[in-house]
Amino acid sequence: MDQATLLKTLTETRAAWEALLAQIDEEQMFQPGAAGKWSVKDVIAHVTWGESEIAPVLRTHVLAGSDLWNLSDDERNEIDLTVARAQIDERQGDAARGVRRDGVPSTR
């Protein structure tokens, strides 16, 4: 696959993913069962982790990832889910306190 085809595929796939997510309301976002015991929110966190892991590979052309790659899928997913939930909880707490991601108080 050449670069143009890859970028086109990524763009189209991302658009389809976002269109699918737009159909899900907030209540559905938190319900377990989207993928096993995971909610849609958990799946999004997992996909986000995967994207963050593959970005350096694409930039450097070196297949080297975190130590999580050495774990079984179930072990890695459980860790990923725990970390992602903690990050989401932290962000929600920041938002509730009126603090942006960069630590600057937000204006309301």
Image (tube, helix red, strand yellow):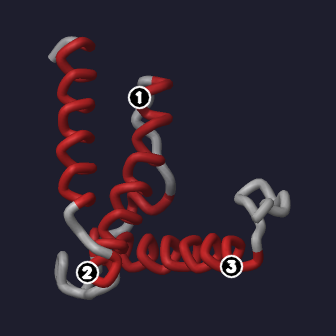
Q: What amino acid does circle 2 point to?
A: Gln
Q: CA distance from mark 2 to mark 3?
A: 21 Å
**Picture coordinates of residue 72, whole percent (x, y):** 30, 70
Residue in view at x 71 percent, y 73 percent? 94
Badge 1: residue crowd in 10 Å (few <14, some 14–19, many ≥20): few
Query: Which quadrant of the figure contains the N terminus?
Result: top left
Mark nearest the camera among 1 and 3 is 3
**Picture coordinates of residue 11, whole percent (x, y):** 26, 30
Residue in view at x 50 percent, y 53 percent? 66
Look at mark 1 in the image and give the residue it sits on: 58
Vertical placement of residue 16 versus 10, above or below: below
Q: CA distance from mark 1 to mark 3?
A: 36 Å
Q: CA distance from mark 1 to mark 2?
A: 33 Å
**Picture coordinates of residue 79, whole percent (x, y):** 45, 76
**Picture coordinates of residue 6, whole percent (x, y):** 22, 22
Residue in view at x 40 percent, y 65 percent? 45
In terms of sequence position, does the residue under pointer 1 or pointer 3 come before the other? 1
Say which of 104 and 55 sits in front.
104
Q: What amino acid does circle 3 point to?
A: Ala
Q: Which of the labelled discs sits on residue 28, or is there none?
A: 2
In terms of sequence position, does the residue under pointer 2 or pointer 3 come before the other? 2
Mark nearest the camera among 1 and 2 is 2
Badge 2: residue crowd in 10 Å (few <14, some 14–19, many ≥20): some
Q: Secondary structure at mark 1?
A: helix
Look at mark 3 in the image and give the residue it sits on: 96
